[in-house]
Amino acid sequence: MPTNETWTTKVEQLAADERETLLGTSLSRRFSRLPLWLSHPANIGAFYGLLVSLALLLPYAFAEADNEVWGVQWIYHTGWLLLSCAFLGFISLALVTVSKRHPVTPPRSMLYPMPFLGLALLTIDRTGLLSMPAVVVWALLLLPGPVYVHLSWAPRWRLLCMIEDGTDPFEGMETKSETVAEAEEMVGKDTEMLEVVDAFESE
């Protein structure tokens, strides 16, 4: 198996758009620095479940003055969150292995606020101000991590595994840079068409 240095060298030798596909944005780049066994989609999903569980400590601990079993409830729900998110990570990897699709940018503007909104609704529910539907609360808390893993990290992890095994995941595929170069050759000095090509490259 190639060493981490060899794996890094292979990634650096790829085209810029291929490196971007492999490494993604800041969050995925952090995960890509981890050993592949540790950054398995199931582990990343479980890590998200752990983060959500830690955020639930205060609502569980201070929701009711006479709540003497909040710790048991928290541990119980933490276990379910970890298992659910890890299981969804396994499912995502299985689906990606079959479909062989490449990473897709998750809808960040929609996913990022969801855990905070779910936490706020859970706090309101547990303090007794209003009764919130449990399905809505837990969906808001649970879904962002697994959606990110399914759309972005599981496909990216599969590609990184292929790189580590010495397989080129982009073999036979026309990269964006090649497409843009061919388009520039076709349009020549047509400035309007070049603007369209530049816009395509920026996307």
Image (spheres, helix red, strand yellow):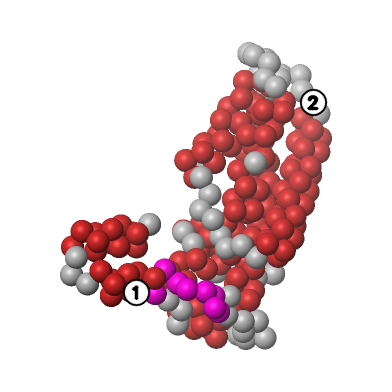
User: Which residue sits at x=79%, y=42%?
Assistant: 80
* Residue contact at pointers 1 and 2, CB within 8 angstroms: no
Magenta stretch, residue numbers: 170-178
Name the spot of residue 28 as percent of width and height, x first: 53, 60
Secondary structure type for disc 1: helix
Q: Nearer the viewer, residue 193 or 117?
A: 193
Label 1: which residue? 182
Label 2: which residue? 68
Residue density around tag 1, few if under 14, some if 14–19, many if 20 or more, within 10 Å: few
Magenta segment main secondary structure: loop
Tell me the kind of residue under disc 2. Glu
Q: Is residue 26 left or right of residue 61?
A: left
Name the spot of residue 33 as percent of width and height, x first: 55, 69
The answer to which quarter of the image holds residue 52 is: top right
Chain-order first, disc 1 or disc 2: 2
User: Which residue sits at x=33%, y=74%?
Assistant: 181
- Count of marks placed on residues: 2
Q: Nearer the viewer, residue 202 or 85?
A: 202
Image quarter (top left, top right, bottom left or bottom right) of the C terminus: bottom left
Tell me the kind of residue under disc 1. Glu
Name the spot of residue 193 as percent of width and height, x first: 24, 61
Q: Nearer the viewer, residue 197 or 133?
A: 197
Secondary structure type for disc 2: loop
